[in-house]
Image: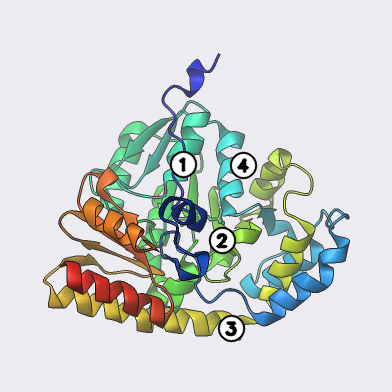
Amino acid sequence: MFEKLKNLKTYEAGKPVELVVRKYGIKPEEIIKLASNENPYGPSPKVIQAVKQNTPFMHRYPDDSYYELKEKLSKKHNVKNSNIIIGAGSDQILEFAIHAIKPKKVLTAGITFAMYEIYSKQVGAEILKTPSKEHNLNEFYEIYQKQKPEIIFLCVPNNPLGECLDAKDVFDFLEKIDSETLIIIDGAYQEFAAFKDKNKEIIPSKILDYPNVLYTGTFSKAYALGGMRVGYGIANEYIIKNLYKLRPPFNITTLSLIAAVKALEDEEWVKKGIENNFKQMQKYIDFANENNLKYINSWTNFIVFYIKNSTKIANELLKKGIIIRDMSSYGFDALRITIGKPEENEKLLKILREIN
Ligand SMILES: *Cc1c(COP(=O)(O)O)cnc(C)c1O
């Protein structure tokens, strides 16, 4: 019955707090979760207050046009409402795009966000990966010329590695790809990259001139609304109009909609979180340097460093109530750690220093 799903893997999300509570009997408030690139500070108090105030309206569907959210996003990104589609996380936008095109071939970096492959295989596509783990646009172009994939994914910056292409190189690449191929620029961590280095900033309004480019953004990372499931796509009206054909009605919730709108009214909060992120990241870089561990320079809210026995270390940490991501399933020993609050990072680093 399910032969067509034979080659499909289930997405492995970061381990939930609940699992560690059940398995190791640790109190939920003592668990440190640094595995899913969530914002450890949570959303602005104004967001929380607005959601609370609106709980009595949860029996109502949201405004299905998402007018207010699109108004705010269109001002922020200097595009029109008609250039925006809202999704249940940016994941849903990726799903719309792949299901809309039903590609035969999809091209991605050697190691990148797992959902590209999962959605592609759902429609029977073959996944082409560059030999390099990290994004290498020369390799992308070479494979593109030979194989003519219908979709190319650029994850800028890349999850789970953290590296980031220069915006200029991305735009040079767009120029070389003909309009039969859709290029999806996944900007899930763009807020972090743009803060750290303006050369990494992809300005979504600049992609509207291309007939074949879709930008995706999310409220799950910098905006701290992972649990609310809100993301968006920005593209020319022709692309957006077609993606709309895949969208179920009311695809985000009444409370998610309120939360996203309010989050955009407190950009100061978001900026503070990003500033703290890079300050705290330095502690991990110091740790790596002290111990001669190689790490990948990161433009995101997580950092990867290579360390022997990463599976064993991740399991030991789990028993102590600390959840991080072991990268050994990618074929090399490394850990991906989401940057937490100061006290969380201190505690984790103390244990890592003891183990190492
Ligand atoms: C987190 C993430 C997303 C999407 O997250 P949503 O919660 O679905 O918005 C998309 N791409 C990458 C690379 C991510 O890390």
Which of the labelled discs sits on residue 96, or is there none? 4
x then y, percent, for residue 333? 20, 52
Residue 275 relative to residue 206: left or right: left
Residue plotted at (68% across, 54% down):
85
Local packing at callout 2 (Cα closer than 10 Å; few below 14, some 14-19, many 20+) is many
Q: Earlier in the sequence, mark 1 or mark 2?
A: 1
Which of the labelled discs sits on residue 217, or is there none? 2
CA gap, disc 1 and disc 2: 20 Å
Q: Residue furthest left?
A: 292
- Mark 1 element type: loop
Q: Quadrant of residue 79?
A: bottom right
Front-lying residue, 89 or 198: 89
Residue 162 in sight: no
Q: Quadrant of the C terminus?
A: bottom left
CA gap, disc 2 and disc 4: 14 Å
User: Is residue 272 placed above or below 79 in the rendered structure?
Assistant: below
Type of amino acid at the residue the image marks with label 2: Gly
Residue 120 relative to residue 205: left or right: left
CA gap, disc 3 and disc 1: 31 Å
Q: Earlier in the sequence, mark 3 or mark 2?
A: 2
CA gap, disc 3 and disc 4: 31 Å
Residue that mark 1 sits on = 11
Local packing at callout 3 (Cα closer than 10 Å; few below 14, some 14-19, many 20+) is some
User: Is residue 193 placed above or below 321 in the rendered structure?
Assistant: below
Type of amino acid at the residue the image marks with label 1: Tyr
Asked whether the beta carbons under mark 2 and mark 4 sit within 8 Å of each other, the answer is no
CA gap, disc 3 and disc 2: 18 Å
Residue that mark 3 sits on = 269
